[in-house]
Amino acid sequence: MSKVAEEKMRNHALAHVNERKEVMGLMLGGVYRHNGREYALVRDVVTTDLDATEVSVRFDRDAFEKLFASLDESGFRYIIVGWYHSHPSYGCFLSSTDIQTQRAMFNRSFHSALVIDPVNREIDVFRLRDGRVESRPFAVYWDPYQEPYASKVVRFRKQVKGPETAIP
Ligand SMILES: [Zn+2]
Protein backbone atom coordinates (compact mmCIF):
# COMPACT_ATOMS: atom_id res chain seq x y z
CA MET A 1 0.00 0.00 0.00
CA SER A 2 1.13 3.50 -0.63
CA LYS A 3 2.30 5.65 2.24
CA VAL A 4 -0.46 8.11 1.33
CA ALA A 5 -3.15 5.42 1.67
CA GLU A 6 -1.66 4.14 4.92
CA GLU A 7 -1.53 7.65 6.39
CA LYS A 8 -5.12 8.40 5.36
CA MET A 9 -6.40 5.22 7.02
CA ARG A 10 -4.33 5.81 10.16
CA ASN A 11 -5.39 9.45 10.45
CA HIS A 12 -9.02 8.52 9.83
CA ALA A 13 -8.90 5.97 12.66
CA LEU A 14 -6.99 8.33 14.97
CA ALA A 15 -9.45 11.17 14.34
CA HIS A 16 -12.22 9.15 16.00
CA VAL A 17 -10.20 7.44 18.69
CA ASN A 18 -11.36 9.70 21.52
CA GLU A 19 -15.01 8.94 20.88
CA ARG A 20 -13.96 5.29 20.49
CA LYS A 21 -15.80 5.05 17.19
CA GLU A 22 -14.95 2.69 14.40
CA VAL A 23 -14.18 4.07 10.94
CA MET A 24 -14.20 2.41 7.55
CA GLY A 25 -13.54 3.01 3.88
CA LEU A 26 -12.65 1.43 0.57
CA MET A 27 -9.15 0.72 -0.74
CA LEU A 28 -8.49 1.62 -4.38
CA GLY A 29 -5.70 0.31 -6.52
CA GLY A 30 -4.81 -2.44 -8.92
CA VAL A 31 -3.93 -6.12 -9.14
CA TYR A 32 -0.58 -7.17 -10.58
CA ARG A 33 1.67 -10.17 -10.90
CA HIS A 34 5.33 -10.44 -9.96
CA ASN A 35 7.33 -13.66 -10.30
CA GLY A 36 4.11 -15.57 -10.81
CA ARG A 37 2.50 -14.25 -7.64
CA GLU A 38 -0.52 -12.04 -7.55
CA TYR A 39 -0.44 -8.95 -5.42
CA ALA A 40 -2.72 -5.98 -4.95
CA LEU A 41 -1.56 -2.42 -4.77
CA VAL A 42 -3.51 0.05 -2.62
CA ARG A 43 -2.88 3.50 -4.04
CA ASP A 44 -5.58 5.47 -2.28
CA VAL A 45 -8.59 5.14 -0.02
CA VAL A 46 -12.00 6.78 0.05
CA THR A 47 -14.66 7.04 2.69
CA THR A 48 -17.90 8.87 3.39
CA ASP A 49 -20.20 9.64 6.31
CA LEU A 50 -20.42 6.72 8.66
CA ASP A 51 -22.93 5.20 11.00
CA ALA A 52 -20.55 4.04 13.72
CA THR A 53 -20.36 2.85 17.32
CA GLU A 54 -17.54 1.45 19.44
CA VAL A 55 -18.00 -1.99 17.95
CA SER A 56 -19.68 -1.50 14.60
CA VAL A 57 -19.52 0.65 11.52
CA ARG A 58 -21.21 0.97 8.18
CA PHE A 59 -21.59 3.56 5.48
CA ASP A 60 -24.41 5.94 6.31
CA ARG A 61 -27.35 5.13 4.07
CA ASP A 62 -27.60 8.74 2.88
CA ALA A 63 -23.91 9.04 2.14
CA PHE A 64 -23.45 6.85 -0.91
CA GLU A 65 -23.69 9.80 -3.28
CA LYS A 66 -20.74 11.35 -1.48
CA LEU A 67 -18.89 8.05 -1.66
CA PHE A 68 -19.44 7.76 -5.41
CA ALA A 69 -18.31 11.37 -5.83
CA SER A 70 -15.08 10.55 -3.98
CA LEU A 71 -14.60 7.54 -6.22
CA ASP A 72 -15.08 9.73 -9.29
CA GLU A 73 -12.51 12.18 -7.96
CA SER A 74 -9.82 9.55 -7.36
CA GLY A 75 -8.03 10.69 -10.50
CA PHE A 76 -6.81 7.31 -11.72
CA ARG A 77 -8.22 4.09 -13.08
CA TYR A 78 -8.72 1.84 -10.13
CA ILE A 79 -10.39 -1.28 -8.93
CA ILE A 80 -11.64 -1.68 -5.39
CA VAL A 81 -9.09 -4.02 -3.84
CA GLY A 82 -10.71 -4.20 -0.42
CA TRP A 83 -11.86 -2.25 2.58
CA TYR A 84 -10.44 -0.98 5.84
CA HIS A 85 -11.99 -0.44 9.21
CA SER A 86 -10.84 0.20 12.75
CA HIS A 87 -11.08 -1.70 16.02
CA PRO A 88 -10.39 1.01 18.59
CA SER A 89 -8.50 -0.79 21.39
CA TYR A 90 -9.59 -4.36 20.76
CA GLY A 91 -6.94 -5.59 18.37
CA CYS A 92 -6.70 -6.63 14.74
CA PHE A 93 -8.78 -9.60 13.64
CA LEU A 94 -11.90 -10.24 11.60
CA SER A 95 -15.09 -10.60 13.62
CA SER A 96 -17.87 -12.86 12.40
CA THR A 97 -19.63 -9.77 11.00
CA ASP A 98 -16.40 -8.74 9.25
CA ILE A 99 -16.12 -12.23 7.74
CA GLN A 100 -19.71 -11.99 6.49
CA THR A 101 -18.90 -8.62 4.89
CA GLN A 102 -15.77 -10.06 3.31
CA ARG A 103 -17.68 -13.06 2.00
CA ALA A 104 -20.51 -10.97 0.56
CA MET A 105 -18.58 -8.01 -0.87
CA PHE A 106 -14.89 -8.87 -1.13
CA ASN A 107 -14.67 -12.51 -2.14
CA ARG A 108 -12.02 -12.29 -4.88
CA SER A 109 -8.49 -13.57 -4.22
CA PHE A 110 -7.06 -10.04 -4.38
CA HIS A 111 -9.60 -8.57 -1.95
CA SER A 112 -8.15 -7.61 1.40
CA ALA A 113 -9.63 -6.49 4.69
CA LEU A 114 -7.31 -4.13 6.51
CA VAL A 115 -7.95 -3.70 10.23
CA ILE A 116 -6.34 -0.90 12.20
CA ASP A 117 -6.32 -0.52 15.97
CA PRO A 118 -5.42 3.12 16.57
CA VAL A 119 -5.15 2.65 20.34
CA ASN A 120 -2.70 -0.23 20.26
CA ARG A 121 -1.19 1.14 17.05
CA GLU A 122 -1.49 -2.02 15.03
CA ILE A 123 -2.43 -2.75 11.45
CA ASP A 124 -3.09 -6.19 10.01
CA VAL A 125 -4.41 -7.32 6.66
CA PHE A 126 -6.59 -10.37 6.03
CA ARG A 127 -8.30 -12.21 3.24
CA LEU A 128 -10.48 -15.23 2.81
CA ARG A 129 -8.95 -18.31 1.28
CA ASP A 130 -11.14 -21.37 0.84
CA GLY A 131 -13.57 -19.76 3.26
CA ARG A 132 -10.99 -19.33 6.00
CA VAL A 133 -9.42 -16.11 7.22
CA GLU A 134 -5.72 -15.75 6.65
CA SER A 135 -3.36 -12.95 7.52
CA ARG A 136 -1.79 -11.38 4.48
CA PRO A 137 1.74 -10.02 4.18
CA PHE A 138 1.90 -6.36 3.25
CA ALA A 139 4.35 -3.55 2.77
CA VAL A 140 4.18 0.22 2.65
CA TYR A 141 5.84 1.98 -0.28
CA TRP A 142 6.23 5.57 -1.27
CA ASP A 143 7.28 7.65 -4.15
CA PRO A 144 10.63 9.21 -3.19
CA TYR A 145 9.38 12.51 -4.58
CA GLN A 146 6.60 12.54 -2.00
CA GLU A 147 9.19 12.34 0.78
CA PRO A 148 6.81 11.52 3.61
CA TYR A 149 9.77 11.17 5.95
CA ALA A 150 11.72 14.18 4.81
CA SER A 151 14.17 15.11 7.55
CA LYS A 152 13.20 12.10 9.66
CA VAL A 153 15.19 8.94 10.26
CA VAL A 154 13.42 5.81 9.06
CA ARG A 155 14.19 2.38 10.40
CA PHE A 156 13.73 -0.50 7.97
CA ARG A 157 12.63 -3.48 10.01
CA LYS A 158 11.87 -5.90 7.24
CA GLN A 159 12.96 -6.01 3.62
CA VAL A 160 10.56 -7.53 1.15
CA LYS A 161 11.22 -8.79 -2.34
CA GLY A 162 9.27 -7.40 -5.22
CA PRO A 163 8.42 -3.99 -6.51
CA GLU A 164 7.61 -2.67 -3.08
CA THR A 165 10.48 -1.17 -1.15
CA ALA A 166 10.27 -1.69 2.60
CA ILE A 167 8.14 -1.62 5.71
CA PRO A 168 9.03 1.42 7.78
ZN1 LIG B 1 -14.23 -5.51 12.64
Image (cartoon, helix red, strand yellow):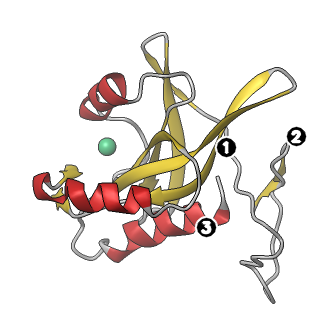
Q: Residue at (22%, 57%) from the top-left corner?
A: 65
Q: Which residue bears the numbered disc 3?
A: 4
The response on whether ligand 1 sits within 8 Å of label 2 is no
The response on whether ligand 1 sits within 8 Å of label 3 is no
Q: Are marks 3 and 1 in contact (CB under 8 Å)?
A: no
Q: Is residue 58 left or right of residue 87?
A: left
Q: Is residue 102 left or right of residue 130?
A: left
Near-viewer residue (143 or 70): 70
In the rendered view, tell whether residue 5 sits above or below residue 146. Answer: above
Q: Are marks 1 and 2 in contact (CB under 8 Å)?
A: no
Give the residue type that dot 2 points to: Lys
Q: Is residue 156 left or right of residue 11?
A: right
The response on whether ligand 1 sits within 8 Å of label 1 is no
**Residues under labels 3 and 2: Cα distance?**
21 Å
User: Can you give x and y, in whole percent of width and height, for residue 51 in the image?
Assistant: 15, 58
Q: Which residue bears the numbered disc 2?
A: 161
